[in-house]
Structure formats: structure tokens, C-alpha cells
Image (tube, rainbow, N blue to C red):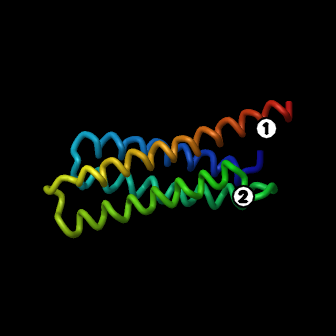
Amino acid sequence: MSPVIITGVILIHIAFICYSVFIFLEHKYKRATKGLLVFITTAVIFDVSATVCMIIGVAEKYFTLHGILGYTALLVMVTDAIFIWKHKNKFGSEVPFSKTLNRNSKLGYVLWLIAFFTGEMLAVMNHQAAV
């Protein structure tokens, strides 16, 4: 595995941890707390960085099923982060999120997990094929 791909794998796992903590905090507090904003923003930064590493490091096509799932999940994550920051800027941190925003965050997370685990499965299958 190339160093760029290894870096991408590390970054995507950090994004996974940050996104998971964000979802937990959003479910628990249902408001734009400082910690929640830090975790969603950090998740986006690490996911974008990991995606760039994967694009640079992979010689195959960019538009595989996993790639399309991943790009879509990243777009949903970025959109969710934008809506959460807009909520924070408009209403502050004391006004709870709407049920729609909360539901969309969770649905986006499920999509992101599907993309994440298809990537994990592909990595395992590629590793086994190389052995």
C-alpha cells in the first residue's frame, strides 16, 4: 500500500471517530454546542483530506460504487455541517435543532457509514487478493 493511501486510511479513521462523536453529541444535546461544532468541522476536514489522498493514491477509476457512495456521503456531511453552522449563527447555541435537521444528520451518518464500510471491505478483499 502506498504512503498516500496509508495516510488516507488514517485520516478517514480519524474522520470516522469525529463524525461518530458529533452524532452522539447531536443526539444528546440537540443544540449547536461548541464541542459539536468542533467535531463536525474536524470530521469534514479529515474526510476531505482522506478523499484527496485516496484520489491521488488510487490508480483505478474514480467512479466506482464505493467512490460514488463516498463522494455523496462527503457532500451530505459538508451540507449538514453548513446547516448546523447556519443554525448556530442564526439562533445561537441555546435553540435546539429542528427534528428535520437532526434526522437528516443521522441519515447522512448512515450513508457515510455505508461508504466507510464498503471501503473497509474493498481494502480487505484487495489485501487478500494480493496475498
Position of 12 with respect to 17 (left or right) is right
Numbered disc total: 2
* Residue shown at the point (59%, 38%) measured from the top left: 117
How many neighbours does mark 2 have within 10 angstroms: few (below 14), some (14-19), or many (20 or more)? few
* Amino acid on which the number 1 mark rests in the picture: Asn
* Above/below status of 25 relative to 63: above
The residue tagged 2 is 63
Image quarter of the N terminus:
top right
* Above/below status of 33 relative to 119: below
Image quarter of the C terminus:
top right
Toward the front, the furthest residue is: 100
| Lower sequence index among marks 1 and 2 | 2
Residues at marks 1 and 2, CA–CA distance in whole angstroms: 17 Å
In this view of the protein, which residue sits in the foreground, 95 or 48? 95
Residue 34 position by quadrant:
bottom left
Residue 45 in view, yes or no? yes
Residue 14 in view, yes or no? no
* Residue shown at the point (36%, 46%) measured from the top left: 22
Q: Helix or strand or loop: what does disc 1 sit on?
A: helix
